[in-house]
Image (cartoon, coloured by chain):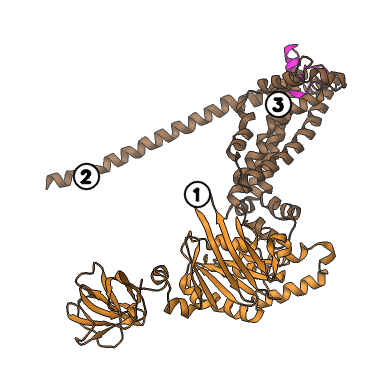
Amino acid sequence: MSDASARLSAPVPRYADRMREGFAVRALLILLALAFLVLFLFLPLVSVFAEAFKRGFDAYLAAFDDPDAMAAIRLTLIVAAIAVPFNVVVGIAAAWAIAKFDFKGKNLLTSLIDLPFSVSPVIAGLIYVLLFGAQGYFGTWLKAHDIEIIFAVPGIVLATVFVTFPFVARELIPHLQALGKDDEEAALTLGASGWRTFFKITLPNVKWSLLYGVLLCNARAMGEFGAVSVVSGRIRGLTTTIPTQIEILYNEYNGVAAFALASLLAALALITLVLKTFLEWRYADSIAASRHS
Amino acid sequence: MSVTLVIDQAEKQFDIYPALRGVSFTVEPGELMALLGPSGSGKTTLLRAIAGLEQLDHGRVLFDDVDTRRLSLRERRIGFVFQSYALFKNMNVFENIAFGLRARPRAKRPAEADIRRRVGDLLDLVQLAGLEKRFPAQLSGGQRQRVALARALAIEPSVLLLDEPFGALDAKVRKDLRSWLRELHGRTGHTTVFVTHDQEEALELADRVAILNLGAIEQIGSPDAVYDQPESAFVCEFLGETNKLPVHIAGGQAFFEDMPVFRSNGQNHLGPASLYVRPQHIKLVDNGPLSLQGVVAHIRRNGAIRRLEVAVKGYARRLELDLASAVAPAVGERVAMKITAGHIF
């Protein structure tokens, strides 16, 4: 009898203990996450803007008056304007091939798409120097035909394309795979051409994934440093992009100008984040619907 | 408009297993044919091969006299209803149905007014008038199914193919749609092939049923023929309910436990075999020749009829039979039974 009642009453305090522990653990984890966010994300972001405006608003604007800075901004925009559409087209093609067709070497292609993520951008840059540089494999031929790739805009575009290639394809592949082939097959049996099927059926089905991919791809294309730094040669006013220009300015102890430019990239990151969140919030239903079934 | 559909020696091999092994049959113009079989029997592969969504390794599919290998998907003019319906989520009901008309090459594309009229007619036909502005997500399962059908009919298909047309619906809607589809087929008269794993659906709906097993046709015939005269053990076991008795055949009679139980007229077997008997083909009798002894183990109601489970010596399972009269024996009572019809394989 006493044994039974002891067994009955025992769980009560133990249960309460567990709840208290749970709360403590939860609070600790939340605090930890918060501390991390503040220390590694929020503080740096704030300090970028703080440094940029340290000498006042006029000094901040003056940083953009510099022709080198303007050239860097222009080059960054040009590179993104080429690399992003290119990667959208190729990324869609690769994702389509992987999601809709069965062929030998499909797994290899899937892992190759991820390669740019696992290769250090500096190595990626060096590979292009090795291929197209003056001492590279194609260097003599390129020089003979007056084609400049390394230390010029084409090299920067190539390096950026390489580094940002996975974003679009990786967003699309799982989505296309989840959607299956039924919709496309239905369109084809109804007599639609391949193009019509793609533009009327497939593209509307994956538009949100595609948009995410483009946003991320663009952010990275504008922010890429390592690979671009290697292939561009960092010729001021000619082959510097925003990130490489920032480094040059910073190394010259021109903190305000460096952080003024950095604030542009930080703003781009914030805008990307806000856009992504806004899209998720505004179109949550249709995104869920397009991912469902 | 209806065509004769001929499948000639269709063969298809997937990675390790054969999906179709020399399948041949003909579907007459306006006929409603069911492809029935367990999962993995190759029925969906066959349907997709007819549609041109799957390439055959060997064999041909003919629409009338035209070899479809020479036709593009557009030229085949297939009305295909997918199991998932595959409605276009970003288009409303009207645009879904109009899709096939709008997708025609410019020269053959109907005028906007004609498209409106045609879609309107189809909406009436599938009883969805008034819902043309809805999106697929706002429709019930049965309504989606009918939109998928209307969309397939819009292109005036030469052949209508349906993959598990009622697979995703609940039982009640399923029954309603079944008779509705039968009636619709009577009115439109397309040569139609549908795939199902539901025998009740196949037997009720189809003019003829092709029963597939492991990529080959076991039997093909009218619902009555395949049900009453099964040609193989597989068809016997697959269609309807059946008791399978281990018997020994000698002198035109089937022996169970060394007692003659069934006269195997015309079925040329000798030695050990299986006797397949449907529950409605066993009746209770007073003792007599060719009778089988057993003890009633359980009685349950199966809709309108009562089902007796009888324990028989020498038979591991219980013999099931449908009770014809209103008078039922008690559980535990000894009974004598006579087999009125059966099939030996």
Dots 2, 1 in contact, CB < 8 A: no
Q: Nearer the viewer, mark 1 or mark 3?
A: 1
Determine which residue is flagged by label 3. A224
In the rendered structure, which amino acid carries the disc numbered 1? Answer: Ile
Q: Residue at x 60, y 67 (%)?
A: B7
Q: How would you rate the neighbour count of disc 3 (Cα within 10 Å): few for under 14, some for 14-19, many for 20 or more?
A: many
CA–CA distance in space, label 1 to label 3: 47 Å
Farthest left residue? A1
Image hue for chain B: orange
Determine which residue is flagged by label 1. B16
Q: Are marks 3 and 2 on the same chain?
A: yes
Task: Give the extent of the magenta segment.
Answer: A233-255
In this view, the residue in front, B138 or A91, is A91
The question of residue A247 being in magenta is answered with yes
Question: Is A43 on the left or on the right of A19, as rendered?
Answer: right
State the mark number for residue A9: 2
Residue A279 screen position, x and y as percent: 67, 46
Q: Residue at x 77, y 28 (%)?
A: A157
Q: Nearer the viewer, mark 3 or mark 2?
A: 3
Image hue for chain A: brown
Location of residue B330 with respect to B114 vertically, above or below: below
Residue B32 screen position, x and y as percent: 58, 75
Question: Is A139 on the left or on the right of A21, as rendered?
Answer: right
